[in-house]
Structure formats: C-alpha cells, structure tokens
Image: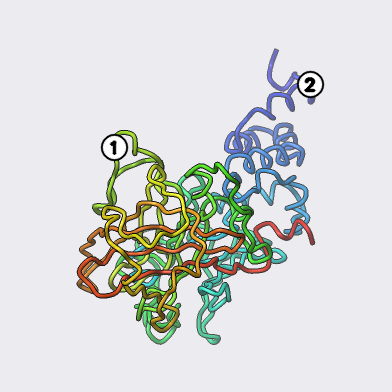
Amino acid sequence: MALLEVSGDGLRAILQHLPPKNLCICKLVCRKLKALASEDTLWEAQCHRWFQRHGQQSGLCNVAPSRLRSQLHHASYASMYQVLHSLGGWPEGYWYRTGLSAQPHGDLVWIGLRGAVLHVVQLDHDGLQTATFCKILLNTLPVQIVLRTLPAHGRVLHANAIHINSSAGTMLLRPESNRDGDVTRPTDVAQRYERWPPGDPGLYEDSQELLRLHRVSPLPSVLPHPGAPVMPDLQPGFTAAQALQRVVGLWTAFYGDHGPEILHVWFDETLQSHNGAPVFEGRNARPRLVGCKVTGDPNVPATQWSFVAQAGEMKLGPWDGRGSWTNDSEDLQNRLIVTMRGLPALVNMSDRQVVARFLCHGCINRTPGNFQPEWVPAQLLLYKGPQAMFSVLFDDMDERYRHMMDFKLVPLPGKSALSWLQE
C-alpha cells in the first residue's frame, strides 16, 4: 500500500509520533501531508511535550498549552511552538547574573511575563526594580528582544540572540552573527548605547555577550516570599536537615563597608571542592549548606561561595556563651560581637534565642580585586521562633571583635512566577 493510500486518520496517527522537525519535512512532501502536518491539534501536542521538557524549573510543565496561547494571543499552536522553540526554554523566575560583565558586583534578575512580553529586570536587596535589561516580545515572529538603549537609538535583536539551556539552568543573550560569523555591532558603541547597569564596562565586551544568567533554584514558587515571611517553628526532635532547610532561598546581609549583598542558599550534595572550601569525609560527609553570592564585592565577588555549613555538625541551643566550634573553653561572654547594619553594632547574645548551631566556614579575601580565598572557622546560628533570620558568626581568633552577619529574607516582588495564570 502506498503512503498516500493510507487514510487521513491513519496518517494522523503516524504524524503524532513525529518530532517537530520531521513534521516540517512532511509539509514539503505533498499537499495532503502538508495539510495534515499543519493541523493545529498536532502542534498543540508538540507544545505540551515542550512544556514537559523545558518547563520543569519554571513550573510551566503544569500549565495547559491553551492557557499560554491565550496569554500570548497567538492564532495557532503552530505559531506558538515557533516562539517556544526559538527561546529554547521558559525563562520566568529568578536568576543571577554571571560572566565577566557581572564581576565583581553581580545582579539579582527577575524575568516575568506581562501580557505577551517577558520583562528582564534587575532587583536590589529590597526586592525593588532598579533597571530593565531588556524586553522579549513573544507576540511577534520572529521573537524580538528589545534592549534598554537610549531613546533615540532603539536596538532590536531577533530570537537567535537568545540561548536558554533548561537542563543547565542558564541563559545567554549575545549579539547576532552574520553569515560570515562576525558579530554585528554599531560603529560607535559609546555614543549609541547606554551602559546597563551604570558602572559596567558597557554592553559589548570581549566575550561578545550582553547578558549571562544562571537560574535560582528551587522553583520560585517555593522560595521564601515577603507575603509569608514567617517560618514554621522547629518541633522537638528536629534533625539537622530539617533545621537547615529553613534557610534555603534568597537572603541579604550587610558585608561591612560593601553594604548589603544578596546570597542564594542551597544544599550542595556533590561534596566537590570549590575554591578550597572544606569537604568533610566519613560520617560527616553530608550535604553541605552553601551560601553563594548573587551580588558581591571586590573581596569576594558575585557567584563565589561566601560560607559553607556542614549538615552533620549540629549543636543544640540555647546559646551558652562558649566559643568557637573547635574551642569550647573560650568564653565569649567577655568578647564583643559586632554585626553590621550599615554601621557597626554590638550584639547581646543573651537577647537571642539560639536553637541550633552548625559548624561553618566563611570565605575571606585579603586583597580586593585579586581573589585568593581563605576559609576561616565560623558558626551558623538558627533562632527559635518564626522570625525569618539566621546568622554567621566568624571566629576571628586574632582580632578583638567577633564579626557576625545577620541574614534576612530578600523581599521578593509581589508577583511570583506564572502569576499571569491567576489574572
């Protein structure tokens, strides 16, 4: 039996198992296959499969394709699939800026869908929008990316300028290349393009990238949120993992004269060495709690680890006034502890209800601009009650003062990822 003698329903049954590339090839065979391969029910199924492959980290995998199509105002699922395919992944959620252009300060980035436009914006430690990096227009074919430029010189990139890797959780925006492989750029960058954010070297750099991002995990929907800043209190008999799970998310603290900085805190189960960070073996080879800088400074720049806490090393409270983790004979009642809240402030530990302490190491660098990390002993302190707060207390054995950083939740924007589903 020839292929064209197969009934329409039979051909549809075959076509629904083909990948998108092969469907497009079928359109070139003959009119009958072109009509069948263009049916929107096939492309709705392709959109659903794309959601499952590329929407795990953003939560899009739980959304019906019809809901996004309505949001983007696309006439067909076929045209919506073109948009999705050109993106390579669904970028809604929280990211932090990486790459050479982000050093040493970095940025916290929020990508959210408003109407049919993805807004890529910079947030500060208070969760306030401070700049717009770009807008990604999803109601046009091809997808267009509008950079933040001077009003008189709008700059638009097409979809091949954006590269999203869903599995790796990365996103790269770079200038388009012409057929010879050369990067297209204006003749006078300094005059035509505004620097974003202010103080950076500019849009176009030696790496030929405009924006490099790494996704903040876990899903934005389960990150601590200002709408519910109260954390459940720890119940008697809690484990070390249960205690440390309270501090997974985005936090901010004052780093001395550098001011407030943002950290992404998560569990690291690889136990691999990172810039000399301590790795415990044997019974203490447990997942580590890592505090990675989303925003940084010349001493410890963005994307570097600020502290590492061992889940297998926990001491229960209350605070007994005795010392460093390795030297319980050291009486801290007579030692001054200083925390930074913009200005140095003395801390009375008797006013704090410490419920648990963890062995911790903090990263320091004595030469700004030349990153040579040293890891010094410290403790991570958790407190009783629902207050969303934890502290890292450095040993500072050779100094008069013990330095402590108090971490508080970053007040994230009022809208979470996929908030358009509730509109």
Q: Position of residue 36 (x, y in %)?
A: 74, 34
| Residue named by callout 2 | 7
Looking at the image, which residue is at 72% across and 36% down? 42
- Mark 2 against mark 1, which lies toward the viewer? 1
Question: The N terminus lies in which quarter of the figure?
Answer: top right
The one of 46 and 142 positioned closer to us in this rendering: 46
* SS class, disc 1: loop
- State which tag comes first along the sequence, 2 or 1: 2
Which colour scheme appears in the figure?
rainbow
* SS class, disc 2: loop
Amino acid tagged 2: Ser
Residue 171 in sight here? no
Residue 386 in sight here? yes
Is 412 located above or below residue 88 in the figure? below
For this view, does 388 lie left or right of residue 331?
A: right
The one of 420 and 116 positioned closer to us in this rendering: 420
Is 181 located above or below residue 28 in the figure? below
Q: Position of residue 100 (x, y in %)?
A: 33, 66
Res. 319 image quadrant: bottom left
- The reply to whether the C-beta atoms of the residues labelled 2 and 1 are less than 8 Å apart is no
Looking at the image, which residue is at 37% across and 40% down? 270
Give the Cα distance between marks 2 and 1: 65 Å
Q: Which mark is residue 43?
A: none
Q: Position of residue 171 (x, y in %)?
A: 47, 56
* Number of residues whose C-alpha sits closer than 10 Å to that of mark 2, classed few (under 14), some (14–19) or many (20 or more): few
Q: Position of residue 160 (x, y in %)?
A: 49, 57
| Residue named by callout 1 | 281
Amino acid tagged 1: Glu
Res. 304 image quadrant: bottom left
* Number of residues whose C-alpha sits closer than 10 Å to that of mark 1, classed few (under 14), some (14–19) or many (20 or more): few
Looking at the image, which residue is at 32% across and 72% down? 334
Question: The C terminus lies in which quarter of the figure?
Answer: bottom right
